[in-house]
Image (tube, helix red, strand yellow):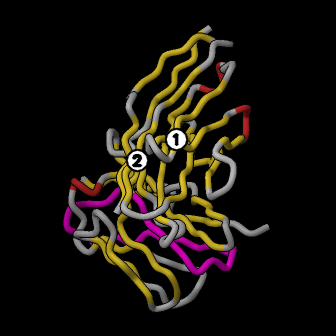
Amino acid sequence: AQSVTQLDSQVPVFEEAPVELRCNYSSSVSVYLFWYVQYPNQGLQLLLKYLSGSTLVKGINGFEAEFNKSQTSFHLRKPSVHISDTAEYFCAVSGTDSWGKLQFGAGTQVVVTP
Amino acid sequence: DAEITQSPRHKITETGRQVTLACHQTWNHNNMFWYRQDLGHGLRLIHYSYGVQDTNKGEVSDGYSVSRSNTEDLPLTLESAASSQTSVYFCASSGNGQQFFGPGTRLTVL
């Protein structure tokens, strides 16, 4: 079984400033890792995923994340945020033996202000 | 284009009634999932299926059931709706390295 902890429930950030959203996981098996974004009153959109290979993963909208196996982390970063990045962000994990069966974190609300 | 749809998008029902939420995908994915989203909990897995006639319980399966009679559909049934089941429900399908979520159904149980 897997579990995910998103260390910040809310992150306020100024426009054009960098942001980092922290995610730690635990698992007894190898994992796939994901970040999703949810805009108000909308569904989930995949930002990026780590399946294998390079530990630095680049996604849509200028986001990137780094898989750190020794620290069991998958932190999400963006060097310069826009107002339109205001949304809720979810980290998720699945075992490599159970593709698609996701365990989600509780979410991090990002609020970007001018 | 292939897609995953949910219906209805909004539903209000009364305590004790049976409710069925539909999920239909045209990706031809074998794997399908139902999650519920509640504030402070993220998304939690209710039931999932890895193929026709296969169903499995997730983390929060009490009070819910699913059936899988074909590849495209995984309906979620609330046998006797309770106020604690007021939530937003998301269906998802996955296969061939892809995963997609439906738009969600907002269910209110009064």
Identify which residue, B80 or B28, lies in the foreground.
B28
Label 1 packing within 10 angstroms: few (<14), some (14-19), many (20+): many
A50 is within the stretch colored magenta: no
In this rendering, position of residue B84 left or right of residue B70: left
- Residue B37 coordinates in the image, percent (x, y): 39, 50
What residue is shown with label 1?
A74
> Is there one chain holding both mark 2 and mark 1?
yes
Q: Chain of mark 1?
A: A
Residue at screen point 28% across, 69% down: B61
The residue range painted magenta reads: B12-35
Quick check: A15 above or below A34?
above
What is the secondary structure assignment of the residue under circle 1?
A: strand
Q: Earlier in the sequence, mark 2 or mark 1?
A: 2
- Residue A102 coordinates in the image, percent (x, y): 46, 60
Residue at screen point 62% across, 58% down: A51
Q: Chain of mark 2?
A: A
Point out which mark residue A25 bears. Answer: 2
Residues at marks 2 and 1, CA–CA distance in whole angstroms: 8 Å
Q: Where's the N terminus of chain B, which quadrant?
A: bottom right
Seen from this angle, which residue lies furthest top? A114
What is the secondary structure assignment of the residue under circle 2?
A: strand
Identify which residue, A25 or B79, lies in the foreground.
A25
- Residue A86 coordinates in the image, percent (x, y): 58, 26
Quick check: A36 above or below B85?
above
Tell me, yes or no, whether the two marked residues, 2 and 1, touch with CB atoms within 8 Å. Answer: yes
Seen from this angle, which residue lies furthest right? B1
